Image (cartoon, grey):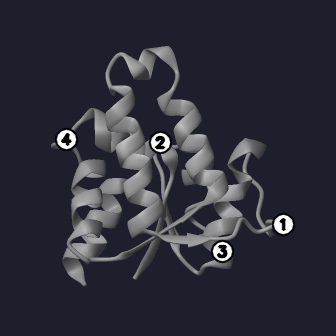
Amino acid sequence: MRAVLDPNILIAALLSPSGAPAQLVNRWLSGAFELLVSDGLLNELERALAYPKLRRRVPEDDAAEFVSLLRLAAVVARDPSTATYRSADPGDDYLLALAEHERAVLVSGDRHLLDLADRLPIQTAHDFLDRLAAA
């Protein structure tokens, strides 16, 4: 199984080590699914982790180490140039395009993306954990 984890899921994994997003990262590290990232996704993650409100909770070294782990251990796919589907937030369209192009589930906590779950393979962290448990 292949998945794209929205940067908000990856950040939540760092902020709450016992939450569903952290459990997903641990499941990926143990080989339960293939994690797909792209330069665009990793750049957004780096930008967000540099925000002062997050920097207070995630030290710079920890943030850099996490992004480095993703670059080295996840599958780095190219950023598709177009998306078939659009979100109410155009800034999220690259995630839709990446998941579609790579034939992966998109895991997100973003309401704009989850609103499309009836038409696209988009799941919450809890739902994707349940899916992994059932597999």
**Callouts 4 and 3 close, C-beta under 8 Å:** no
As rendered, which of 92 and 42 lies closer to the eye?
A: 42
Check the image and report above or below for 94 versus 135. above
Residue 135 placement, left or right of 91: left
**Callouts 1 and 3 close, C-beta under 8 Å:** no
Check the image and report above or below for 57 versus 106. above
Q: Amino acid at mark 4?
A: Pro
Judging by the rendered image, the residue that carries numbered circle 3 is: 100
Q: CA distance from mark 1 to mark 4?
A: 34 Å
Label 1 neighbourhood size at 10 Å, few (<14), some (14-19), many (20+)?
Answer: few
Dot 1 falls on a residue whose secondary structure is: loop
Judging by the rendered image, the residue that carries numbered circle 4 is: 17
Dot 2 falls on a residue whose secondary structure is: helix
Judging by the rendered image, the residue that carries numbered circle 1 is: 82
Q: Residue at x 61, y 45 (%)?
A: 43
Dot 4 falls on a residue whose secondary structure is: loop
Q: CA distance from mark 2 to mark 3?
A: 19 Å
As rendered, which of 26 and 129 lies closer to the eye?
A: 26
Judging by the rendered image, the residue that carries numbered circle 2 is: 8
For marks 4 and 2, the one nearer the N-term is 2
For marks 2 and 1, the one nearer the N-term is 2
Residue 108 placement, left or right of 119: left
Asked if residue 97 can be seen in this view, the reply is yes
Q: Which residue is most to the left?
A: 18
Q: Can you give x and y, in whole percent of width and height, for residue 85 in the image?
A: 76, 64
**Callouts 1 and 4 close, C-beta under 8 Å:** no
Q: Which mark is residue 61?
A: none
Q: Amino acid at mark 1?
A: Thr
Q: Can you give x and y, in whole percent of width and height, for residue 99 in the image?
A: 60, 70
For marks 1 and 4, the one nearer the N-term is 4
Q: CA distance from mark 4 to mark 2?
A: 14 Å
Q: CA distance from mark 2 to mark 1?
A: 22 Å
